[in-house]
């Protein structure tokens, strides 16, 4: 199994299903590194050096270690209820959201909702949003009036890896590009 496959499996475990390898996350999403390695090792080869390499090489910076590398967590994208200690931040005037054509009707009617995740994920630039949208099909990008949302007291958070998060984006703040 490649490092990419192992990284995807780690993402599944730390964001959605820690029970698949018999571990649990604390209230802030942290998992014991030894427990994670031992759990993954039941089905896939992994050691500490490989885990550190996966975390360091991840271009989306999905994971964070604590200072002494005894704990690890996903930075965002959880479907399970954890508090990754996000700090409220005033967003830029405009953010972007990449999706696929097949979701346009739903987005145009409901706005952006987190579905199975805790937050809606937004990008700081158009190009990133296009790339996100491509993962789900033919990309469609929405311009988000985040400055106006913030003025209307809608909270924003910035994850450790630079992804902007909010609970929802009502239709009135969306503009399809």
Image: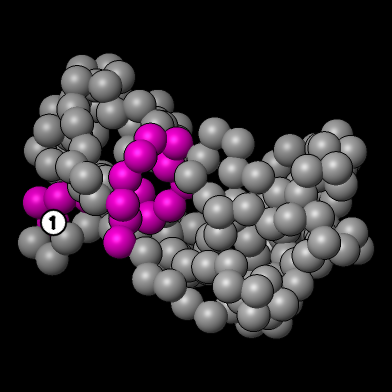
Q: Measuring 19% from the left and 20% from the top, which residue is drawn there?
A: 22
* Residue at 87% in and 47% down: 108
Residue 84 located within the stretch drawn in magenta: yes
Please state, as top left, top right, bottom left or bottom right, where the C terminus lies in the image: bottom right
The region drawn magenta spans: 69-85
Q: Nearer the viewer, residue 78 or 133?
A: 78
Decide whether the magenta segment is chiefly helix, strand or loop: loop
**Which residue is rendered at x = 30% and y = 19% of the image?**
20
Q: Based on the picture, tell me whether residue 5 belongs to the magenta stretch.
A: no
Expressed as whole percent of the image width and height from the top left, the position of residue 58 reads: 43, 55
Q: Name the residue under label 1.
A: 69
Query: How dense is the environment of label 1, judged by Cα within 10 Å: few (below 14), some, or many (20 and up)?
Result: few
Residue at image location 43% in from the left, 72% down from the top:
88
Image quadrant where one finds the N terminus: top left
Task: Residue 148 in the image: state x and y as whole percent.
Answer: 71, 77
- The quadrant in which residue 171 appears is bottom right
> Would residue 102 be seen by someone viewing this image from the given angle?
yes
Residue 94 is left or right of residue 155, and the answer is right
Could you tell me if residue 131 is visible in this image?
Answer: no
Q: In this view, does 3 lie above or below 112?
A: above
Q: Looking at the picture, how far across and down is residue 65, in whole percent? A: 22, 57
- Percent coordinates x, y for residue 126 in the rendering: 76, 68
Q: Is 8 placed above or below 49 here? A: above
Q: Is residue 64 left or right of residue 90?
A: left
Front-most of 40 and 118? 118
Q: Is residue 78 left or right of residue 115?
A: left
């Amino acid at each position: 199994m490649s490092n990419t496959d192992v990284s995807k499996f780690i993402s599944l475990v730390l964001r959605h299903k820690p029970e698949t390898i018999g571990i649990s996350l604390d209230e802030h999403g942290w998992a014991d590194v030894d427990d994670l390695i031992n759990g993954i090792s039941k089905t896939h080869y992994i050691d500490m050096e490989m885990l550190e390499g996966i975390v360091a090489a991840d271009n989306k910076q999905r994971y964070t270690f604590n200072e002494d590398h005894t704990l690890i967590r996903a930075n965002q994208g959880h479907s399970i209820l954890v508090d990754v200690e996000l700090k409220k931040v005033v967003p830029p005037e405009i953010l972007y959201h990449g999706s696929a054509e097949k979701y346009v009707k739903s987005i145009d009617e409901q706005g952006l909702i987190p579905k199975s995740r805790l937050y809606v994920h937004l990008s700081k630039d158009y190009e990133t949003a296009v790339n996100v949208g491509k993962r789900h099909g033919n990309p469609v990008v929405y311009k988000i009036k985040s400055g106006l949302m913030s003025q209307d007291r809608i909270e924003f958070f910035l994850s450790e890896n630079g992804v902007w998060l909010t609970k929802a984006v009502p239709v009135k703040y969306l503009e399809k590009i």
